[in-house]
Image: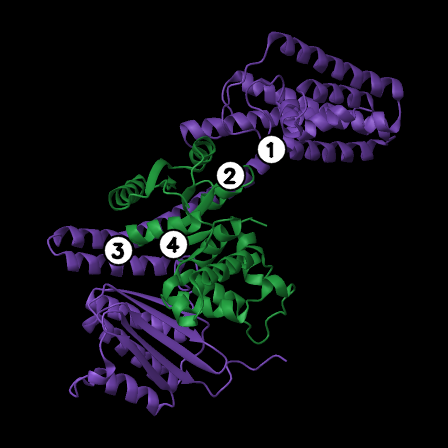
Amino acid sequence: MTDDPVRVFLVDDHALFRSGVRAELDRGVPDVTVIGEAGSVDEAVAAIRHLKPDVVLLDVHMPDGGGAEVLRRVRPEQPDVVFLALSVSDAAEDVIAVIRAGARGYVTKTISGRELADAVHRVRSGDAVFSPRLAGFVLDVFSDRPGAAPPGDPELDLLTRRERDVLRLLARGYAYKEIASELFISVKTVETHVSSVLRKTQLSNRYELSRWASDRRLV
Amino acid sequence: MRLRSGRFVAGVAGGVAAHLGVPVLWVRAAFVVLAGVGGAGVLAYGLLWIFVPQETAEVARHVPRAERQQAVGLAALGIAVGIAGSAAGDSFVGWIVGPLGVAAIGAAVVWREADQTQRKRWTEGARTGLSGWSALWRVMAGAVFVAAGIAVFLFGNLQLGQIQFALLAVVAALVGVAVITVPWWLKLVRDLGEERRERIVEAERAEIAAHLHDSVLQTLALIQRQSDQPREVLRLARGQERELRHWLYGPGGYGRQAVESGGLAAAVTAAAAEVEDTYAIDVRPVVVGDRPVDDDLRALVLATREAMVNAAKHAGVEEISVYVEAEEDGVHVFVRDRGVGFDPDAVPEDRHGLADSVHARVTRHGGTVRLRSTPGEGTEVHLSMPVSTPQEAPSS
């Protein structure tokens, strides 16, 4: 990580919300600069191609396909751009859909400016960001209820005990540092576990995950 | 979709070309060649004309003069080839497909008028029937085409006596009328479908508008009147957000069947909402798994609510995290704040909230309470309740 500020691009169809986030990030956070913003899918794809930002803050709900559509169009040609989904929606299918389309994390729009900046730095350095709710969803999806279909690929369809512990603490509202000291592991290890859970969420063929994704025509 | 502008006859060839993504010349040439095969091209053109709807929007297309002349030439060539084919061939195909093609084109001419009346109806309101002499002429011409096609078809294929001929003439006339009126029937069905769809959309819109009016607009009005009381504004905004969220995404919300789950998740969420409203703080419940609420779990929910209230009252925070996990053998609840915290050993005797409402209540039902608090860092209450009865009958 260098001292250069992280270059952030905002995608949201509400101009009011964009200017709010922009003001918050510009005001309190010196190490994050907003280099541009877009209000529609087409605009966003063109501008991201042109500006090559480090991190894109991506609204989940937009006309013409929403955040998932932006991901689908930008990711193949610019794999280096990192996406953090930002939404008012708590609906599981929306969250899971953008995560499976390639977002590195998901936070709700009620997040504070400071927390948002932290999340931006975290995804920038290759880690994943899970809101407590997202952690809850993922735990729910990967839990083994009686009568559930057996996992097809244990490598992707099951969480390890440690990953489960980390997710539980995330869902309980713990920060990475607090999780590390709770489980007697390093923060780096916590980050590794969360990244691994993200990968499984993106690639697993578990029924609920693939159903939500196929509803959004992602697979 | 048949083209509306930039067409020569009915826009069939252009439409097919646009659909297949090939030059329109190829399509026209193909129709000409097929016209030679016993008039199949003519028949195909007529059928496509009847059954493929014309595009609804007027799109400006520029057609070069050369292409227009080419199209005229090809159309004439196609008709000539078709006639020559059926006359010279004198075959089964020539006598059946050719006349039917002529009949189809006649019907298509009539259909074209139906198209135009439909357009007129859109612009001028409800006005059926045809307008002007030219339209009448075209319909007549169409009818003659249909009659001629059917007549040639019959004479060419059958040898008949007097009575049979009379009968057949009646039948043929009926068939002709049916063929000519087919476009109107089709149009009627399509219009009805269109109208029904518009009505459904309208009903949906009305329901959404009504809901937003009753909820969001009212709350916004309240917020404007109380703008000098930030705490009240916050409380209103949170309550409204929760309500709208539930309506949009909840199980009994908009567009879903009203299923009242009555399970643990719903009970915890409701308790969190109450605390949020009463104490104007942010409570974020995350629930994993669900199960029906029995007496033990009801006690657990009440204790959870009390723990939230404690945090709201004493921790001095804006936000409380609540995590509930329903597992096979029990339910775990964590209520956490990052507030002032306290020393559990130094709680004065008169503070009964935690002791009575939380601890006693849970232990009475066989559960346990663990409390962790550090002054300055916050408090976490861990409630757990074992569950004796299995959640569902295991399938294995």
Viewer-nearest of discs 4 and 1:
4
**Looking at the image, do the residues carrying marks 4 and 3 touch, with CB atoms under 8 Å apart?**
no
Q: Rounded to the nearest whole Å, what is the CA distance between mark 2 and mark 4?
A: 21 Å
Q: Nearer the viewer, residue B337 or B254?
A: B337
Q: Rounded to the nearest whole Å, what is the CA distance between mark 1 and mark 2?
A: 47 Å
Which kind of residue does numbered mark 3 sit on?
A: Asp
Residue A104 locus on image (x, y percent): 47, 51
Quadrant that contains the N terminus of chain B: top right
B159 relative to B282, above or below: above
- Kindly indicate which chain is depicted in green in the rendered structure: A
Farthest residue, direction left: B228
The image shows a total of numbered marks equal to: 4
What is the quadrant of residue A110 in the picture?
A: bottom left
B230 sits left or right of B204 in the view: left
Residue A39 locus on image (x, y percent): 37, 37
Secondary structure at numbered mark 4: strand
Kindly identify which residue carries mark 1: B183
Kindly identify which residue carries mark 2: A74
Which kind of residue does numbered mark 2 sit on?
A: Val
Instruction: Give the chain of mark 3.
Output: B
Viewer-nearest of discs 3 and 1:
3
- Kindly indicate which chain is depicted in purple in the rendered structure: B
B264 sits left or right of A157 in the view: left
Q: Residues within 10 Å of mark 3 (few under 14, many from 20)?
A: few
Q: Earlier in the sequence, mark 2 or mark 4?
A: 2
Q: Residues within 10 Å of mark 2 (few under 14, many from 20)?
A: some
